Image (spheres, grey):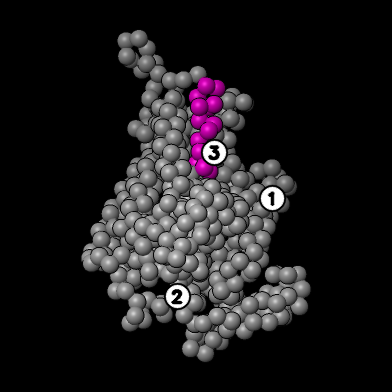
Amino acid sequence: MRDWLLSDQPAQLLPARSQMAFTLMFHIIFVPLGVALPALMLIANYKGLRRGDQVALTLARRWSHVAGLTFAVGAVSGTVLSFEMGLLWPGLTGVFGDVFGLPFMIEGIAFFLEAILVAIYIYGWRRLKPWTHFWLGLPIPFIAILGAFSIIAANSWMNTPAGFTMGADGLPTNIDPVAAIFTDALPYELSHFLLAMYMAAGFMVASVYAVGWFKGRRDRYHRLGFLIPFTVAAIATPLQFIAGDTIARWLAGAQPVKFSAMEVVTQSGTDQPEIMFGRFDAATNTVTGGLSIPGLNSILVGFSTDTYVQGLNAVPAGDWPSNVNIVHWAFDIMVTIASLLGVLALWFAFLYWRKREVPSNKLFLWCAIAAAPLTVLAVESGWIVTEVGRQPWIVYNVMRTAQAVTHAEGIWISFTVVVLLYAFLATATITVLRVMARRWRGTQHTDDTAAVYGPRPDLDRTGTAS
């Protein structure tokens, strides 16, 4: 929090960053379900149609209703974020809106397309021919990826700005919106983000059925409800290791200060140790405590202990991230959780290979249940690394965050209002999900006609349920 507390910083900087951070951290919980849950429901839908599996179709129907609910809540929290971009950071949007505004237009189009198709898909149960219904739903995951692409493109531009030149008056000229979208950071951030979304959604959905399996509900419904999402997450996990390792090595060259903060590299040089956790002292530029593995950081960056890695000493302290400890700990938490999930995925592969069944090992099931909150924590930590690690720049090496913040008063009041709004949204979402779950538990797994939030029953010509 060093630069937040300096007397020469605008008074609005702390509340503006706090509000934006809180909003992002709330919204990101719903993003995996918005991006990846449609793919899971369509896998179940396809399996049900291909094999005449009514249990798979029931899962697809129920997951579609959860997707509709979480999409609606995510839309509300995401809309608040859109307003905050302009209200809290007018220096950014006012100066660079013409440069990186195109991705937000694409995101708006993707949002409306996804909303329409999700509504058609939910409404279409028992109203459309089965395969027609499936094909109408098939574009949803791709449109969700398009929406994610647009947001990640905007964030990538903030990390590696391109598509413009700064004029003598401090305003951008020679604007190329396409170049602003396809920046150097985009392929790294997008692959890392999408894999994280599929991991998070897969582990979150699977954990619900892991609880049932743990409690002895050993039916096909819980078996399939666990296997589909957990398998997707287990496949995405090793791919995430490759993507994460690649983006970390790229950051060492593209954003060396952020990388130095992630790994708490205090002094530039070769044979850099990998330090897990520990406490960074900004006054002395030293690290105390933690686990230090000699030479590993240089090996991870350049596959040799002779690899040179820039340290924090190479730049003035005013250009360090606002809190190096937060960046470093968030990075280590993310990596630690990803490593644990990787072990869990291998464990699952081994156990399933032996018996072709959901593992009944209680320790495994406890770990599968714990994977849901852990993967959400990993996603939150990743965004902290990305956003706090870029500080004190809102546009890397071009505009400082303090230059972009609003001069309006009353941000603490708006922050309080946002907290209350999101508390209401969280309470309402949990309540509705619990009501849905209770009603679904009270019905047969192949018949949703008694569920308030399930598909409507077929009606004969007189309007009577058949």
Q: Identity of the amino acid at label 1?
A: Ala
| Mark 1 in CB contact with mark 3 (< 8 angstroms) | no
Q: Helix or strand or loop: what does disc 1 sit on?
A: helix
55, 332: nearer the viewer: 332
Q: Which residues are magenta?
A: 131-146
Is there any visible trace of residue 234 in the rendered image? no
Q: Earlier in the sequence, mark 3 or mark 2?
A: 3
Q: CA distance from mark 1 to mark 3?
A: 28 Å
Mark 2 neighbour density, 10 Å: few (under 14) some (14–19) many (20 or more): many
Q: Helix or strand or loop: what does disc 3 sit on?
A: helix
337, 320: nearer the viewer: 320
Q: Identity of the amino acid at label 3?
A: Phe
Front of the two marks 2 and 1: 2
Q: Quadrant of the N terminus?
A: bottom left
The disc placed on residue 322 is 2
Residue 142 belongs to the span the image colors magenta:
yes
Q: Earlier in the sequence, mark 1 or mark 3?
A: 3
Majority secondary structure in the magenta region: helix
- Residue appearing at x 57%, y 84% in the figure: 313
Instruction: Look at mark 3 in the image and give the residue it sits on.
Output: 142
The percent position of residue 300, horizontal first and vertical second, equals 70, 69
The percent position of residue 448, horizontal first and vertical second, equals 42, 29
Q: CA distance from mark 2 to mark 1?
A: 42 Å
Instruction: Look at mark 1 in the image and give the residue it sits on.
Output: 349
Horizontal arrangement in the rendering, residue 246 relative to residue 448 (left or right): right
